[in-house]
Image: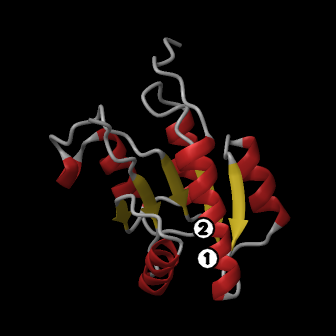
Amino acid sequence: MAMKKLILLAEDNPDDVLLTQRAFKKSTIANELIVVKDGQETLDYLFAEGKYEGRDTSIMPEVILLDIKMPKIDGLEVLKIIRGDLRTKHLPVVILTTSKEENDIVKSYCLGANSYITKPMDFDQFVEAVRQLGLYWLVLNQKPKTKCSE
């Protein structure tokens, strides 16, 4: 039986969480959306620490939607930690943020982001972006079956 592909949404703004959930529903993306509210919770989820202690880390998100401006640990620091750990190094990370600052875009890509999407945009545009994101990362993208050893 194939496992459902999870999506991890790291977003501290409840309105943006609701908007993203609505966009996924309207795009008919039925994958489970795990929502974490800050950078520390993102890392706790990925590494099975804190309230996620004991979580099966063999089940990782198919893609991480990561906001930059988050409490506790900002998204760029989270990205740096993700890319620095063999367990998470190759997880696809899409920056989904309100920041249009060139510096944030450059830093995101330099730290290993796979994509950078700015929000908010008109809801229909956002739904289309989510649909395309789902199609690419959940259907078309091929991941290796074995993990990297270094």
Q: Position of residue 147 (x, y in %)?
A: 46, 19
Up-down relation of residue 88 to residue 135 (above or below): above
Q: Secondary structure at mark 1?
A: helix
SS at badge 2: helix
Of residues 19 and 31, the one nearer the viewer is: 31
At 66% from the left and 84% from the top, the residue drawn is: 124
**Quarter residue 38 falls in:** bottom left
Q: Seen from this angle, which residue lies furthest top?
A: 149
Separation of disc 2 and disc 1 at Cα? 5 Å
| Direction left: furthest residue | 54
Q: Position of residue 14 (x, y in %)?
A: 41, 83
Tell me where residue 134 sits by quadrant: bottom right
Measuring 75% from the left and 47% from the top, which residue is drawn there?
109
Verify CB contact (< 8 Å) between mark 2 and mark 1.
yes
Instruction: Say which mark, if any, is on residue 127.
Output: 1
Q: Residues within 10 Å of mark 1 (few under 14, many from 20)?
A: many
Quarter the N terminus occupies? top left
Q: Amino acid at mark 1?
A: Val
Which residue in the rendered view is the most extreme toward the right?
A: 102
**Residue drawn 30% across the image and 31% down it:** 58
Q: Is residue 71 left or right of residue 106?
A: left
Q: How is the image coloured?
A: secondary structure
**Around disc 2, counting alpha carbons within 10 Å, would you say few (fewer than 14), some (14 to 19), or many (20 or more)?**
many
Residue 3 placement (x, y as % from top left): 31, 41
Residue 11 x, y percent position in the rendering: 47, 70
Residue 119 - label: none
95 left or right of 86?
A: right
Q: Amino acid at mark 2?
A: Val
Q: How many marks?
A: 2
Q: Is 147 rendered above or below residue 100?
A: above
What label sits on residue 130 in the rendered view? 2
